[in-house]
Image (tube, rainbow, N blue to C red):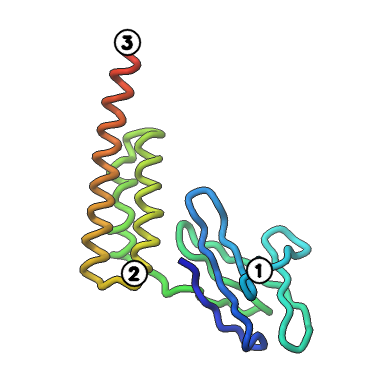
């Protein structure tokens, strides 16, 4: 799910943020083309309507949609989640924390999927229902994978 950003000086241009996935980082698109890389790591070059090139950079939030910094202005790409939404979406890692790499994998996967779904246009009750099912499914997948792996190791 991409987020549209309205920037002063870029009227008429379609500026979108693609949030980071499980293995990739966030990307910035201008008129459906990925923004050019800037002079430093994590920076991008944008061309305003008047032709002036400006530097944009990310201010990362752990597991959340990053904030965008353009001309020293910090822009929220998406509305920050409330603390209780973080708790609801993040409990798979807490629950699976003792599960080592396997538990961490299923927990992290569930959180990334949950956060993307939680920012969708679904009704609130449906978001909680679906993300709850995904979190429970991550727990079940972890347990089944653990049993299968232990059976395979014993052979």
Residue that lies at the very extreme toward the front in this rendered image: 32
Quadrant location of the C terminus?
A: top left
- Disc 1 or 2, which lies upstream in sequence? 1
Q: Residue at x 35, y 45 (%)?
A: 107
In this rendered view, identify the residue nearer to me: 89 or 46. Answer: 46
User: Which residue is label 3 attached to?
Assistant: 155
In three-dimensional space, the C-alpha distance between marks 1 and 2, rounded to whole angstroms, equals: 32 Å
Residue 46: x and y in percent read 71, 75
State the image quarter where residue 64 is shown.
bottom left
Q: Residue at x 34, y 57 (%)?
A: 114
Please tell me whether mark 1 sits on a helix, a strand or a loop: strand
The image shows residue 72, relative to residue 116, as above or below, that is below
In three-dimensional space, the C-alpha distance between marks 3 and 2, rounded to whole angstroms, equals: 47 Å
From the image, state whether disc 1 or disc 2 is nearer to you.
Answer: 1
User: Which residue is label 2 attached to?
Assistant: 82
Say left or right for 116 vs 49.
left
The image shows residue 62, relative to residue 14, as above or below, that is above
Please tell me whether mark 2 sits on a helix, a strand or a loop: loop
Q: Residue at x 68, y 68 (%)?
A: 35
- Disc 1 or 3, which lies upstream in sequence? 1
- Label drawn at residue 33: 1
């Amino acid at each position: 799910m991409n987020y549209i950003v309205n920037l002063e000086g870029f009227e008429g241009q379609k500026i979108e943020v693609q949030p980071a996935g499980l293995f990739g980082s966030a990307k910035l698109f201008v008129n459906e083309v990925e923004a050019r890389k800037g002079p430093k790591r994590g920076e991008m070059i944008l061309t305003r309507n008047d032709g002036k090139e400006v530097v944009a950079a990310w201010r990362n939030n752990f597991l959340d949609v990053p904030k965008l910094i353009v001309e020293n202005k910090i822009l929220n790409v998406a509305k920050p989640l409330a603390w209780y939404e973080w708790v609801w979406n993040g409990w798979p890692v807490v629950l699976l924390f003792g599960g080592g790499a396997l538990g961490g994998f299923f927990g992290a996967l569930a959180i990334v999927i949950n956060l993307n779904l939680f920012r969708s246009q679904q009704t609130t009750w449906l978001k909680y229902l679906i993300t709850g099912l995904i979190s429970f499914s991550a727990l079940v997948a972890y347990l089944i994978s653990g049993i299968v792996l232990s059976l395979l190791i014993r052979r």
